[in-house]
Amino acid sequence: SLAVRAGATGAAARFLSSANGKKVGFIGLGKMGAGMVQNLADAGHKLVVYDANPATTAAVAHSVGAEPASSPADVVRKLGSSAAVISMVPNDKALWAVVKGEDGIFEATAKGSGLLHISCSTVSPFTSRALSDECEAAGVVHVSAPAFARPDGIAKRQAYFPISGGDTVARSASIELIGTTSPETFDFGDDPGAANVVKLSGNYLIASSIQSIAEAMALAEKNGLDRVQVMNMLSSTIFDCLIYKGYGQRVSERDHKPGGFALELGLKDVALVKDTAARSGVPMPVASVLHDRWLAAYAKGRGEVDWSAVALSTSEDSGVDVSAALAKAMRAVEEEKAAR
């Protein structure tokens, strides 16, 4: 309704007028979320934080001097007069649970409070649109701002965020906060699903690049060339850009240790691309191939290594033994789990 929307916009405007140093809620403290929390703390924001893993909540809260919460609803309650919560969760189901589930944001949101919810998760644009409608009915304004970055990029404040949903005031308030992690944000208007379409489009291009690099390196290797030398030449000349440099190194060197973006999450994103394309009436034949490649790698038990490990399957299909590289990546997974 107009009254609900006006209340939400008013709250966002109040937040914007004194955003610097404001108390902010943050839900989802994985590698990406924890990095954003650190950046917000460094910028002077007071924080209330929550993760589904209580040990993670406690550890992150201690490391940045934040107030821990026991649930998303508890985050909202502890914010008091503050009006902004950021979430960074792994999938659509988790996002719905954060907002509408038991002890979710809605349980602690008073009608007309105008809470600003900024979703930095990679989810379906249809999820964002449906969630935005329900948020508006509950007096919450929903803004989508999925992050383009790996955890090291978050830590270096080198993430890029498409942003959409709410209105210009709500997006301006959101940019004040995500700007602590990003040198630049890109406003795609009022449609809350728009930013998610941008994010899926970008991840589709990255997945296509990983698979293409894998095939090109297999071709070079089977013709007796040093695959690393070939990739170094290509990524320093005609493919001199972030994606080809980063993933070119990982694929050519078969460096697929975890810590960046898990293969199981890559499969989720490629599946979202396929679903969005189908629901939008857009044929994307390459997306179907990519989905099969990531699904096959996941079915082999490689879901926890870096998503660039899909390239190992291309080498295997070429008759190349990659067992040593795979074993190294799987050992790194176990070491990471032991260190948690």
Image: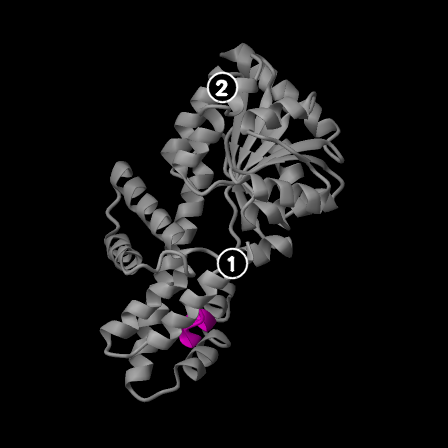
The reply to whether dot 1 and dot 2 touch (C-beta < 8 Å) is: no
Circle nearer the viewer, 1 or 2: 1
* Image position of 158 (left or right of 277): right
* Image position of 243 (left or right of 20): left
Q: Nearer the viewer, residue 29 or 247?
A: 29
Q: Is residue 300 visible?
A: yes
* Image position of 133 (left or right of 116): left
Residue drawn at the location 55% of the way across and 33% of the way down = 118
Q: Residue furthest bottom?
A: 224
| Magenta region | 248-255
Residue drawn at the location 39% of the way across and 86% of the way down = 226
In the image, residue 287 sits, relative to residue 28, either above or below, namely below
Q: CA distance from mark 1 to mark 2?
A: 43 Å
In the image, residue 89 sits, relative to residue 23, either above or below, namely below
Residue identified by numbered label 1: 338
In the image, residue 154 sits, relative to residue 322, either above or below, namely above
Residue 217, how many percent across, how many down?
A: 35, 76
Residue drawn at the location 40% of the way across and 57% of the way down = 304
In the image, residue 176 sits, relative to residue 262, either above or below, namely above
Residue drawn at the location 62% of the way across and 29% of the way down = 84
Which image quarter: residue 13? Answer: top right
Q: Is residue 167 visible?
A: no
Residue identified by numbered label 2: 136
The magenta stretch spans residue 253: yes
Residue 209, how many percent across, how many down?
A: 38, 63
